[in-house]
Image (cartoon, rainbow, N blue to C red):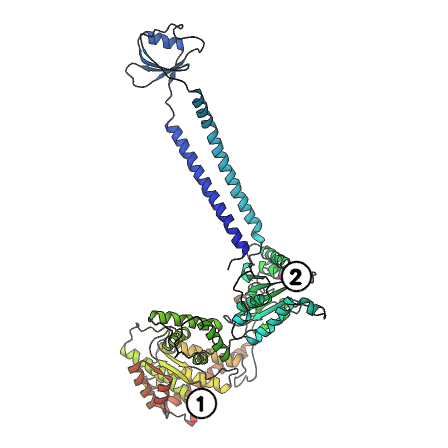
Amino acid sequence: MDNQANRSNRPTNNNRRGMKNFGFIIMLVLLALIIYTSLNQPSKLKTIPLTEAIAQANAGKYSTISVNGNTLDITQKGQSSPSIVTYSDPNTSLKAEGFNFSKVAINFKSENSAASAWLTIGESVVPVLLIGGILFFMLRSAQGQGNQALSFGKSRARLYGNEKDKATFADIAGSEEAKQDLSEVVEFLKFPKKFSSLGARIPKGVLLVGPPGTGKTMLSRAVAGEANVPFFSISGSEFVEMFVGVGASRVRDLFAKAKKNAPCIIFIDEIDAVGRRRGSGMGGGHDEREQTLNQILVEMDGFEQGQNVIVLAATNRADVLDPALLRPGRFDRRVNIGLPDRKDREAILKVHFVKKPLAKNVDLDSLAAKSAGSSGADLANIANESAIIAARNNHREIEQSDVTEAFERVAIGPERKSKVMTELDKITTAYHEAGHALVGHVLPDSDPVHKVTIIPRGGTGGVTWFIPPEDRVYVSLVQFKDMLARGMGGRIAEEVVLGPNHITTGAGNDLQNAAEVAKDMVVNQGMGQRLRDQVFKTDDGMMLDRLVHEREYSEDTAKIIDQEVESLLTEAANRARIVIKANKDKLEALKDRLIVKETVDADEVAEILKGAHMPKAAALY
């Protein structure tokens, strides 16, 4: 949405563009006039004295003389146009000069002195006016560019607050704890005297931290809408330019505008673009980003006090922000906005489906249960994809099948039914996915199977989908180990059935994910065997940070970490191998059903794998 300043700039830009076009037209007209004048310029005539002209005329060498005032244009015999010109004395007649009128034809032209004068004036004045007009528009254009250069350091923040459809907390589903924290900010803006009378200081800033798509920007808009105050919105990247000092100038201009509109809110999205820890980049204190950050620090908590301006900032990388930015007095509060739970997901889905025609058989509660780990943006995308799929299927209402397909498309990618698979590839994929499903079904701490398909989706050749029955806050060691075992189930199924020399590249993504989970267990969760209860910090920030800062553990510890990861993966492969060998008949049955149907749902998987058991050897791990 554009602010008033942007709207007011549009006619000015259009006027400047029109002036430039008008100046170009004037240049074309001037060029055409010059060409016309040069083409219609009379040919140069030979000038002779009047006495010589009279003598030649009396001798009969001329055919015609055209008299125009005191100018005589002479046409010689045998020619069709004048080639000689002479000038008579205005006070003496031609007859008195001895001219014999019987020897040559005389044509007298009536002289229009007024027209001749206007023509002379036009020929001399019009080019001057045209050149002056061109210079005028060129100077105006240069002045406009000068104004743009002067406005280079101005803030590009967009001003909201005069819209009819303001966002409020009622428009946002879920995030009840975050809304409760932010409602106090609204009260500060609405009733500042209520707090100042008790000696309470209005918070300078509130930092919104959460994963992408959780509604940080929308919550900030809702705070401004609830408080009914102006709302300046800008991205952190809009401060930074290649010229040192421009970002700091824009920060000063932004806070100056905000103070004039106080009480108001400044919202800086993705503040980590300028708020990263100082000293981590190259360029030292003269780095443009660091100067911009220094100016933000001064504006938020400098010598000037008593300004009713609150800064809201959003980021999903609070760990890289400068400590001076996070201290009380600048960002006094930190509001964590996490991924929505099941109840919030259902509320968010209802908000996004409220203006869409839903069939009665659509179960949003089950969709909320299946979409654990989805952000608000993901849920909005599911609702939009549902409407698109329903329209493509010529449905008048969004049906349950449309919603299911949209959810699977968003979660694991679209089906690629056009991809041609050989019979051997199809059988290998069926064994692979059946191995995942069998191991995940048998192990007691694994998530239940939701769907198994050998139809390629996204970048995979097939998918075995596990969905937790409820939202999970913590993950135990046994759950991690079952997760690793079922991840290795596809590769082990290929090995058991087809032989160790016939394993395929289909398990590449599974092995990569398993290695990442195992390393996370050892390094970040302290779940290793030899390194139990020890956590090792790894810097996953900017590349320069990783190159400059050393690891906080020795090479010997790194070697032990690699051994721990290898041990976890070997253990997971052994458990999967034991389960698959003990239930090979169930593996074959699920493989056969996948060959026939290509996609098998949770109920049918449970029916096929009914009676599959976990050997004691697998439980010993």
Q: Secondary structure at mark 1?
A: loop
On whether residue 301 falls in the magenta region, the answer is yes
- Of 435 and 353, which appears nearest the observer? 353
Q: Residues within 10 Å of mark 2 (few under 14, many from 20)?
A: few
Q: Secondary structure at mark 2?
A: helix
Is there any visible trace of residue 570 in the rendered image?
no
Residue 67 among magenta residues: no
- Left or right placement of residue 352 versus residue 606 in this view: right
Q: Is residue 264 visible?
A: yes
Residue 77 found in image quarter: top left
Give the residue at x 43% y 82%: 467
The structure residue drawn at horizontal position 43% and vertical position 93%, both measured from the top left corner, is 617
Q: Which residue is mark 1?
A: 444
- Residue 149 rendering spot, x and y as whole percentages: 56, 49
Does label 1 or label 2 sit earlier along the sequence?
2
Q: Position of residue 187 (x, y in %)?
A: 63, 69
- The correct choice, above or below, for 258 with respect to 199 in the image is above
> Looking at numbered disc 2 in the image, what kind of residue is underneath it?
Val
Q: Amino acid at mark 1?
A: Pro
- The percent coordinates of residue 547 (x first, y second) are 54, 68
| In the image, farthest residue toward the bottom | 616
Question: Relative to the observer, which residue lies in front, 55 or 589?
Answer: 55
Is residue 137 positioned above or below 155 on the image?
A: above
Q: Which residues are magenta?
A: 296-307
Q: Residues within 10 Å of mark 1 (few under 14, many from 20)?
A: some
Image position of 248 with respect to 28: above or below: below
Determine which quarter of the picture holds residue 223.
Answer: bottom right
Residue 261 marker: none
- Give left or right: position of 205 versus 449: right
Q: Which residue is mark 2?
A: 298
